[in-house]
Image (tube, rainbow, N blue to C red):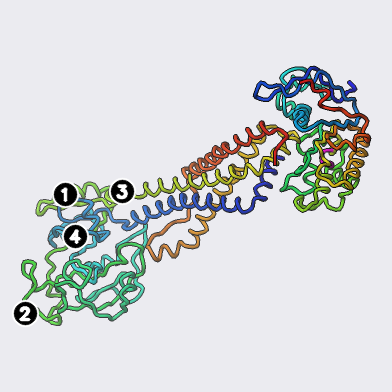
Amino acid sequence: MILFSLAYRSLINRKLTTIVTLLSLGLSVSLWIGIEHIRGGARESFSNTISQTDLIVGARGSPIQLLLYTVFHIGTPTANVTYESYEKIKNNRAVLWTIPISLGDSHRGYRVVGTNEDFYRHYRYRQDRQLELAQGHAPSEIFDVALGSDVAQALHYGLGARIVVTHGITNSRGIMDHDDKPFTVVAILQPTGTPIDRSLYVTLEGIEAMHIDWKEGAPPIKGQETPAEKIKKEDIKIEQITAFFLRTKSRVQTLALQREITNFSEEPLTAVVPGVALSELWSGISYGEQVLQVVAIFVVIVGLLGMLMALYTSLNERRREIAILRALGVGPVKVIFLLVLESGLLTLLGTILGIGIVYGSLLLLQPIIEQRFGLHIPLRPLTATQYGYLTYVVLGGIAIGLIPAWKAYRNALSDGLSVRV
Amino acid sequence: MDNAVEIEQLSFSYRTSKLVLHVPALVIAKGERIFLHGPSGSGKTTLLGILAGVLKAQDGSVKILGQDLTRMSGPARDALRAAHLGYIFQMFNLIPYLNVLENITLPCRISPKRQERLNGRSREDEAKILAGRLGIGQIVADNVVDLSVGQQQRVAAARALMGAPELIIADEPTSSLDEDHREGFLQLLFDQCREIGSTLIFVSHDRRMMPLFDRAISLSEINKV
C-alpha cells in the first residue's frame, strides 16, 4: 500500500522528531502500564502478607486495627488476651493450629514480637511460603532472639550479638530499656517481603521475663530486678498474649468459629478473617493508586499532545510534498489518510515501545524491587482491560492525528499545485 | 476524439467573485507541443490547475482526452490526473524522503493504469530505462537531496513520463536551469514526448524557446477577462 509506505518513509526521514515522539509516547504508556503492574503487585503483596490463616483473634476492638498491629505491626494493641482464653480456643476441635503473638516492645524502632515455635512451623505468606532461617536456629531459650532480614541488615547484627529491648515502641533508645536482660541473636530470617523482615522475634517466655518484676505497668526499682541468670524457663508462667493467628481444620468452620469467639463468655474478643479485613483496608488506601492512575493518564495525554505538536509543526515544510502528491493524483482525502496513518503508526509503535519498556524494566528490576521494597511484581501478560486502555491510546493518537490532517487537507485544497516556497 | 484538450466558455474565480479566467475556446490536438506564455498574474497557474483537475471551473466545459472535468467528482478528477497526466513543477519536484528511483516510479504505484502501460515490464526497469534516456542513469539509487537542480528536473521529467501519460504539463521547468542546460532539457523532453506520443503543454516566459514548439499560445490573448 503506497500510502502506508509513504507514511513510514516520511517518519523515518524525520528521524529525530520521530524518535523523540516515540520516546515520549513510549515512556508515557510505560508509566501507565507500569503503574498498573505495580498496583497489581502491591495489592497482591499486600494481601499475600499473610496466608493460610483463617482467623486473627485479639481483644475486642476494631478488626482493621487488629489486622494492622498483628500483621503489619502498625499501631498498638489496646488490650491483651489471657493465656487461658487462648488455650481454650486453641483446644477447640475445629482448630488446626495457632500462633500466639505478644507485642509491646521494640528495639531501635523495630518491633519485638514474642511468639513460639509454631510461628516458624505454621506461618505462611504468599500462598504457601514458609519462614526460613538464613542462619542459626529458632529461638528456644528465654533470651534468644531471631532477626528479620531487614533488621539484621540495617543494624549490622550477626549471630551472637547481644541486644537490649526497649519497653514500648520508640524509634530511639527508650526511656525504659530492659537493659538488665539483654537478648542474644540466635537466628536471622530469610527475606520475605513482608513486615516480618522488619521485626525481631523472641519467645513468649522472653517477653514475660523482661517484665517479670513489673507491677501495674511500672518498672521495678533499680537494683531490685531479678537477675537474668536466675530466671528459668520452666518457672515462667505466661499470663497473657496480645493476639493469635489460627487455622481451622476445615475452612467451612471459619465463620462458625468466628461467631463462637466473638461470643466468648470469659472475655470480650474479636476474630477477623484476614482476607476480608485486608480487602477492606485496601479499599481504604486505594485512593492513592487512583490518583496515580489519573496522573498517568494525563501523562499519556501530554505524550499525545507532543505528537500533535510535532506533526503540526512539520506541516509547513510538508506543503510542498503534499502539492507533489496532489499533482501525482493523490486525492485530498488520501492526504488526510496519510497524516492520520502517520499519527496512528507513531502511537502504535509508541505503545509497543511502552509495553517493551514495562516488561524490559520489570524483568531487569524485579529482583531488585523485591529485595529493596519487599514488593513482588509478577510478570504477567497484559489483561483485557490493559489492552482496552492501549486501544484507547492508539485511537486517541489517530483522533489527534486528524487535527494536522485536517489542516493539511485545507492546505491541499487551497494550495492546489502552487505552493509559494 | 483527437484532441487532448478542449475548452469551451471556461470561467473561473477563486472564492472572491472576481473572475480570474474566461477562456471562450481552446483546443489542443493530441501530440501537439504547445508553448504557453503570458505575463505574471495572467492566470497561467490557475489554468494549469484547471487542466490538471485540481481546480474546478465554475462554468463551461474542460475536456481532457474527451472527458469533461467540470462534470466529474474530485476523486474522479484525481484518478484521471493520476492515470493520464504528467506534471513538472518549476522546482522542488521530488519527495525528499524517497530516492531517485522511488520518485520516478511513484506514478505507477499511485495509478494502476500507469502500471498497466508498462507492458509487463517492472516499474523499476522502466524507470531505469527512462533515467538512462534522460542521462541520469547513474544516479537512480541516489538521495534526491544530493542532486543538482538540473538533475532534479530530469528526475521530475522522468517521473512525469513514467507510464506514458497522454498529457504532460510543465510549469516553467527550465526557469531554474542555466542557459546551457535549458535547451538540452527541452530537447530530451521533446524526444521522450514523441517517443510515447504525449501532448506537451509547456509554460514559460522565456520566448527564445518559442520557435522550438509546434504552436505558441498567449494566455493574455485567449483569456477574455
Q: Is residue B174 left or right of residue B95?
A: right
Q: Is residue B13 left or right of residue A57?
A: right
Mark earlier in primary sequence (3, 2):
2
Q: Which residue is mark 1?
A: A262
Mark earlier in primary sequence (4, 3):
4
Location of the N terminus of chain B (image quadrant): top right
> Mark 3 to mark 2: distance in Å?
49 Å
Helix, strand or loop: magenta stretch: helix
Q: Which residue is mark 2?
A: A224
Give the residue drawn at x 86%, y 25%: B4
> Mark 4 to mark 2: distance in Å?
29 Å
Mark earlier in primary sequence (4, 1):
4
The disc labelled 4 sits on which kind of residue? Thr
User: Do marks 3 and 2 share a subunit?
Assistant: yes
Q: Nearer the viewer, mark 3 or mark 1?
A: 3
The disc labelled 2 sits on which kind of residue? Gln
- Which chain letter goes with mark 3? A
Helix or strand or loop: what does disc 4 sit on? loop
Q: Which residue is mark 3?
A: A279
Mark earlier in primary sequence (3, 1):
1
Q: Taking B188 as reference, is A154 above or below it? A: below
User: Do marks 4 and 3 share a subunit?
Assistant: yes
> Mark 4 to mark 3: distance in Å?
21 Å
Q: Is residue A199 magenta?
A: no
Give how far across and how far down residue B74 sits, in percent: 70, 26
Q: Label for residue A123?
A: none
Location of the C terminus of chain B (image quadrant): top right
What are the residue bounds of the magenta stretch?
Answer: B156-160
Q: Label for residue A76?
A: 4
